[in-house]
Image (cartoon, rainbow, N blue to C red):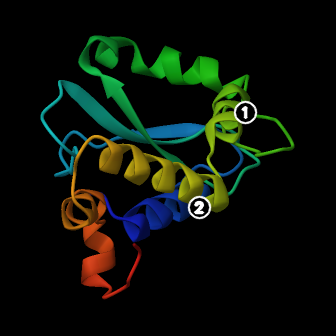
Amino acid sequence: GLTLPFLQHTSYAGSLLVPGVPWYLDLKDKKVEQGQGRWDGETYIARFAGSSERAFRVDAPSYVRDRIGPALGKLVAYSCSSECLGYPHALFRAHEDVRISGQEGGLLRLRLMEMLGDMGMSQPQVRMLMQDFHDVLDMRQRI
């Protein structure tokens, strides 16, 4: 799959090979973990602002494949925000607007557990349903 070090190293290499300009790399020949289910798309690494040090993973549907250069090029014009240089501003704002704080997430989790209990689920059933496998792996008690 595509790992964070691979993304960071590719970003660094891109900065050395094509300094000061936006670029993208098609990962069609690299095995990339697509997540749950299959989808018909391609994965790229792109740096949207030449003055940025960061590149980002971009997953695009296959129907964009033949126009990916111009499509990513249009994002360059929207990636100069001081809030997150090199990342499309609208995507940054959307992320900020939908982000759920840890406290809010905890309250929502408790409300959901209460609703499941009201629907007749037992406490062990609710715990099993709400268990995060990462907590199991890390041996953390969450509920």
* Tally of marks: 2
Q: Dots 1 and 2: beta carbons under 8 Å?
A: no
Is 122 on the left or on the right of 111, as rendered?
Answer: left
Residue displayed at 21% across by 67% down: 124
Residue displayed at 39% across by 53% down: 113
Is 9 on the left or on the right of 76, as rendered?
Answer: left
Residue 88 point in image, percent of width and height: 67, 32
Q: Amino acid at mark 1?
A: Arg
- For the C terminus, the quadrant is bottom left
Q: Which residue is mark 2?
A: 16
Residue 67 point in image, percent of width and height: 39, 12
Residue displayed at 77% across by 45% down: 85
Snapshot quadrant of residue 123: bottom left
Query: Which of pointers 1 and 2 lies earlier in the amino acid sequence?
Result: 2
Image height of 98 relative to 134, above or below: above
Residue 102 point in image, percent of width and height: 62, 61
Q: Secondary structure at mark 1?
A: helix
Q: Amino acid at mark 2?
A: Leu
Residue 11 point in image, percent of width and height: 52, 58
Which class describes the residues within 10 Å of circle 2: few (<14), some (14-19), or many (20+)? few
Which class describes the residues within 10 Å of circle 1: few (<14), some (14-19), or many (20+)? few
Q: Which residue is mark 1?
A: 93
Is 141 on the left or on the right of 61, as rendered?
Answer: right
**Depth check: 49 or 16 in front?**
49
Snapshot quadrant of residue 105: bottom right
Furthest-left residue in this view: 38
Residue displayed at 58% across by 54% down: 107
Mark 1–mark 2 distance (CA, rounded to whole Å): 30 Å
Numbered label attached to residue 24: none
Q: Secondary structure at mark 2?
A: helix
- For the N terminus, the quadrant is bottom left
Image height of 67 relative to 94, above or below: above
